[in-house]
Amino acid sequence: MAYTQPTIESLKELNLAENTKLRNENAKSKQALEVYEARFANLEQKDKEKSILIVKLDDDIKEIKQSSVNTTPCDDTPEQIENISDNASNSDICQ
């Protein structure tokens, strides 16, 4: 079957139209990919920042717990506390 010149030209036009359509879709896909890559990079950065903040908060919590352990009341017995109280009331400072 021999193709005539008009048939060949018609096929070339269809091919060109299809190529143009595919190139446009490709360009749109590339733009969408760039947008999503930027969004992903932004989310990764926020994730890193949050991780750093979590580590700092954990350190602060450990510090607070440690300082509260260091400032808990001593294990004085009630008699020892009473003696301290008696000594303070008998001192010249309280009079």
Image: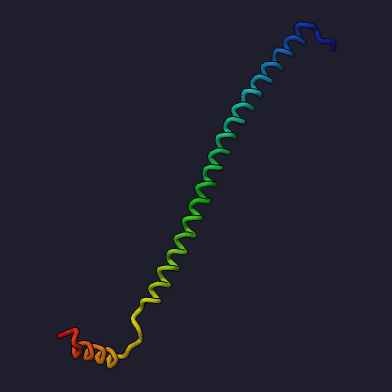
> Looking at this rendering, what residue extends furthest in the left direction?
95
Picture coordinates of residue 77, whole percent (x, y): 31, 90
Q: Nearer the viewer, residue 72 or 16?
A: 72
Report which quarter residue 84 is drawn in: bottom left
> Looking at this rendering, what residue extends furthest in the right direction?
1
Picture coordinates of residue 5, whole percent (x, y): 79, 6
Which image quadrant: the N terminus?
top right
Report the side of 78 relative to 68 (left or right): left
Report which quarter residue 85 is drawn in: bottom left
Q: How is the image coloured?
A: rainbow
Picture coordinates of residue 12, whole percent (x, y): 74, 13
Q: Nearer the viewer, residue 79 or 31?
A: 79
Picture coordinates of residue 37, whole percent (x, y): 58, 38
Q: Nearer the viewer, residue 83 or 50?
A: 83
Report which quarter residue 88 is drawn in: bottom left
Report the side of 67 relative to 13 (left or right): left
The residue that appears at 40% across and 76% down in the rendered structure is 69
The residue that appears at 47% across and 64% down in the rendered structure is 59
Which image quadrant: the C terminus?
bottom left
The residue that appears at 71% across and 17% down in the rendered structure is 15
Q: Is residue 37 above or below residue 28?
A: below
**Number of marks drawn:** 0
Q: Is residue 12 above or below residue 41?
A: above
